[in-house]
Amino acid sequence: MTRYGRATGLFKDPNVFGRFLVAAMLYVLSRLVAGSSRRTPLLFLAPPPLALAVLLSFSRGARLCAGVGLALYVALEFFAATSNRARGKLVGLVGLAALGGGALVVVTLQVDGVGQLFEERAALTHNYDEGPEGRFGGQEKAAGLVLQHALGIGANNSLPTFITRSRTIPTLFYS
Amino acid sequence: MRALTPKAYDHSQRLLERWARGFMWLTVAMGAIVLPEPAPADLFMLILMLVLPPTGLVRFEPVLGGLLAMLLVTGAAALLGASMAFEIGLAIAHTAISLYLYLATIVVAAFIAKRPRAHAGLVLNAYLCAATLAAVAWIVGYFDLLPGARS
């Protein structure tokens, strides 16, 4: 359920895992905002594990997805709300989420190893991204290949083509 | 064979629809488990793609034809690319899986189009359950709350 200290859950890849959770997070938020069902109290159970898992998947893509998605959703909901009461409720929920999220981060940073991984992965790019053998170098090579093969080289053929360090890494950390 | 009375037909149709909806819920919820490949959810989805249209729980809107056309163009381009592949087996397998996903997309979209509010809610609820289950399973594994679960 972990790979190199990153969360994958029942998935193979932390980045796929992280993004799988983002849409569910937005959906549960919308249900909480609508808040008319008798199952609403039960819904409050979902966001903490979802948020924690997105955070600790250490997937830059998933975090960006979650951040942009939440911001867009809250903005749209705020402007589309028909009453100030609904807006107040939204602001209250966002405040609650921020408080809960902050507490969650503080608590998880106390766990051995997690804080360290946080520091390591705080950078925007990592060593497997950079240099001629890194991900971006690989993309430059791919651009050359595109020009040589106008009809493409078929799906899933980039790995047998580039036998470099990027051979294994993109499949693991495609964030 | 004796024809079913309208009432009996209604009853069996409702039962069938209830089972089909339950199966759809289960299929989406199984999306949380993708460690083995092909994932169990894929097997379920294949069954749904065969079973769902005859139950009448789908509505193929003309606009879905447009989506299908675009997806099939993508698939055709992928097949063209596969003909140039260095390892054609890999390319064909990848493209075939993509084609399956295109068709699954259309079936799920047609299912939601049949009763948009109820069916979209059903799919999203199952998805929320799957995501929460996956997140909780991860927490249990990550923090070693259950001995041996970390691997």
Image (spheres, rainbow, N blue to C red):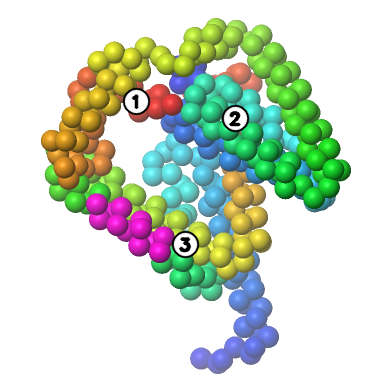
Q: Which residue is located at x 77 percent, y 47 percent? A: A81
Amino acid under disc 1? Pro
Q: Quadrant of residue B17?
A: bottom right
Based on the picture, tell me whether residue B133 belongs to the magenta stretch.
no
Q: Position of residue A66 (x, y in %)?
A: 58, 32
Please tell me how crowded label 3 is: few (under 14), some (14-19), or many (20+) other residues with Cα within 10 Å. Answer: many
Q: Position of residue B121 (x, y in %)?
A: 65, 55
Q: Which residue is located at x 74 percent, y 29 percent? A: A97
Q: Are marks 1 and 2 on the same chain?
A: yes
Mark 3–mark 2 Cα distance, whole angstroms, equals 31 Å
The residue wearing badge 2 is A67
Amino acid under disc 3? Val
Chain identifier of the residue bearing label 3 in the image: B
The outermost residue toward the front is A79
Please tell me how crowded label 2 is: few (under 14), some (14-19), or many (20+) other residues with Cα within 10 Å. Answer: few
Does label 1 or label 2 sit earlier along the sequence? 2
Q: Which residue is located at x 27 percent, y 20 percent? A: A137
Q: Secondary structure at mark 2?
A: helix
A75 vs B45, left or right, is right
Is the C-beta separation of discs 3 and 2 under 8 Å?
no
The residue wearing badge 3 is B107
Q: Quadrant of residue A30?
A: top right
Please state the extent of the stretch shown in magenta in the rendering.
B66-77
Q: Which residue is located at x 46 percent, y 66 percent? A: B63
The residue wearing badge 1 is A170
User: Of helix, strand and loop, which mostly describes the magenta segment?
Assistant: helix
Q: Secondary structure at mark 3?
A: helix
Amino acid under disc 2? Gly
